[in-house]
Image (cartoon, coloured by chain):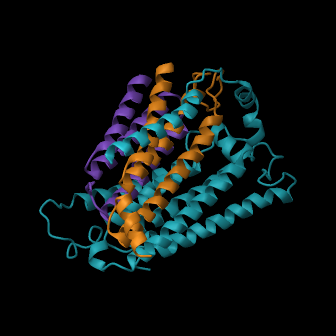
């Protein structure tokens, strides 16, 4: 019955396009009030020169809290399914591409290129990730971007070296993730005690220091995002047996 | 201007057709990724019409791009990758339980076990 | 320039859905993320470009390759 299925798919796509295509193709002019207000007031309200950072860490910090929560829930769910899968397999199947030469399958296309390049590039990418995280308030970058780059660097280090260090063990990384989430909650409550409301800037009075709150939030969010994505990737590669 | 919107609408519809029509579960998750990418492209494209400078407040900036769609799309990209990761883990679990990636074969085998 | 990049993205998207080898589709999705990051830089959105490049070509490709490795690599048509 392939023709019947094809007709059903075509009717569904036509109905969806009736709803969606007029929205995409509409031609109204984009309003400019928000852009003009932010051009004049973003630096004096939050202390950041990067306007996008000022929005998602200053004016709409509640969205950032929600997104961090979604990341936490999804990584927890994925790890729960992964650990159950890992218990049903033998060791040789899962750890066959990240460890010592004796355990690797013999294959003449398999060279030492991966280990050499990844182990040399790992610390450089880690340094770059911390730079992007810390300078997020005056140049493009910020917590999320730096965090994902730090996660990539941790995956490089796990693939490249054979030494089991504390930086690439899931035990230490998951503890850092939980600690970062706790620090995020504490930093958001601290605004209440200094008369700025929930998620408000507690050091608003001194105008030269008010960007420090955004730097602190960037560091906390970067550590959280980085370690949670690194834990998920290392568990996928099979390295969650060694604590 | 209108051609770019038509291309983005075609990308959206092809992602939707993949979710509805493909029989392999991993191809359906590819379609979810394409839907996400098309919506992000639409917002950034529309927000960039009213200016021609990047939204970093230097000394002499007069005509910057709207920064609000960019802040919203940062959140959308991260949430998209979270949804992909969780759905892929569920797809692998389904494969280990039934032995196939075809959605009709999976439905039949799960119904037989009841 | 925008139209050229968007039509390349559409062509790669359709190829990713119709390929028989799933690894080819994953590489096509990674290429879509790279072209999107280039398009965001042209449209004056540097934060979104860094995020899309790091997330799309890094994390997303890794999780897709893991999923293909633990299931089948070819898209078999069962009758």
Q: Is residue A23 above or below residue A150?
A: above
Residue sitting at x 44%, y 24%: C2
Instruction: Choose top left, top right, bottom left or bottom right for residue B108.
Output: bottom left
Q: Is residue B89 above or below residue B83?
A: below
Residue sitting at x 53%, y 46%: B77
Image location of residue A133, percent across then percent down = 56, 50
Residue sitting at x 51%, y 69%: A173
Image location of residue A96, percent across then percent down = 26, 71
Q: Spot the purple chain and give its letter.
A: C
State left or right for residue A89 relative to residue A46: left
Mark yes or no: residue A237 visible.
no
Instruction: Choose top left, top right, bottom left or bottom right for residue A100.
Output: bottom left
Q: Nearer the viewer, residue A162 or A69?
A: A69
Q: Nearer the viewer, residue A47 or A102?
A: A102
Q: Spot the orange chain and give its letter.
A: B
Q: Look at the image and give the colour of chain A.
A: cyan
Mark yes or no: residue A26 visible.
yes
Image location of residue C52, percent across then percent down = 48, 43
Q: Nearer the viewer, residue B35 or B44?
A: B35
Image location of residue A75, percent across then percent down = 52, 64
Q: Quadrant where the C terminus of chain B lies? A: bottom left
Residue sitting at x 40%, y 79%: A242
């Amino acid at each position: 019955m392939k023709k019947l299925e094809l007709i059903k798919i075509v009717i569904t796509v036509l109905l969806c396009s009736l709803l969606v295509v007029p929205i995409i193709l509409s031609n109204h002019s984009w309003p400019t009030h928000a852009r003009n207000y932010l051009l004049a007031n973003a630096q004096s309200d939050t202390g950041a020169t990067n306007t996008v950072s000022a929005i998602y860490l200053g004016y709409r910090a509640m969205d950032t809290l929600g997104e961090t929560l979604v990341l936490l829930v999804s990584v927890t769910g994925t790890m729960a399914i992964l650990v159950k899968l890992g218990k049903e397999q033998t060791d040789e199947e899962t750890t066959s591409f990240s460890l010592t030469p004796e355990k690797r399958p013999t294959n003449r296309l398999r060279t030492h290129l991966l280990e050499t390049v990844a182990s040399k590039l790992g610390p450089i990418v880690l340094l770059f990730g911390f730079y992007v995280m810390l300078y997020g308030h005056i140049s493009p970058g910020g917590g999320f971007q730096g965090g994902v780059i730090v996660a990539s660097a941790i995956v490089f280090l796990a693939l490249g070296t054979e030494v089991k260090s504390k930086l690439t063990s899931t035990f230490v990384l998951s503890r850092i993730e939980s600690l970062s989430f706790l620090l995020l909650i504490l930093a958001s409550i601290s605004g209440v005690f200094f008369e700025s409301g929930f998620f408000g800037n507690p050091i608003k009075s001194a105008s030269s220091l008010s960007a420090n709150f955004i730097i602190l939030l960037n560091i906390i969010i970067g550590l959280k995002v980085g370690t949670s994505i690194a834990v998920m990737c290392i568990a996928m590669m099979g390295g969650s047996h060694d604590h | 201007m209108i051609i770019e919107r038509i291309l983005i609408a075609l990308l959206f519809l092809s992602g939707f057709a993949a979710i509805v029509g493909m029989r392999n579960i991993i191809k359906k998750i590819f379609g979810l990724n394409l839907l996400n990418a098309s919506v992000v492209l639409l917002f950034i494209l529309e927000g960039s019409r009213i200016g021609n400078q990047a939204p970093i407040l230097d000394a002499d900036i007069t005509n910057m791009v709207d920064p609000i769609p960019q802040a919203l799309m940062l959140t959308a990209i991260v949430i998209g990758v979270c949804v992909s990761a969780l759905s892929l883990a569920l797809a692998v679990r389904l494969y280990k339980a039934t032995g196939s990636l075809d959605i009709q074969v999976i439905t039949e085998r799960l119904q037989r076990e009841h | 320039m925008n139209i050229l990049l968007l039509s390349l993205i559409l062509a790669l998207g359709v190829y990713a859905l119709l390929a028989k080898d799933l690894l080819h589709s994953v590489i096509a999705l990674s290429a879509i993320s790279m072209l999107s990051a280039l398009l965001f830089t042209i449209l004056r959105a540097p934060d979104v470009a860094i995020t899309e490049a790091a997330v799309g070509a890094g994390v997303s490709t890794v999780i897709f390759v893991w999923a293909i490795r633990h299931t089948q690599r070819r898209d078999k048509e069962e009758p």
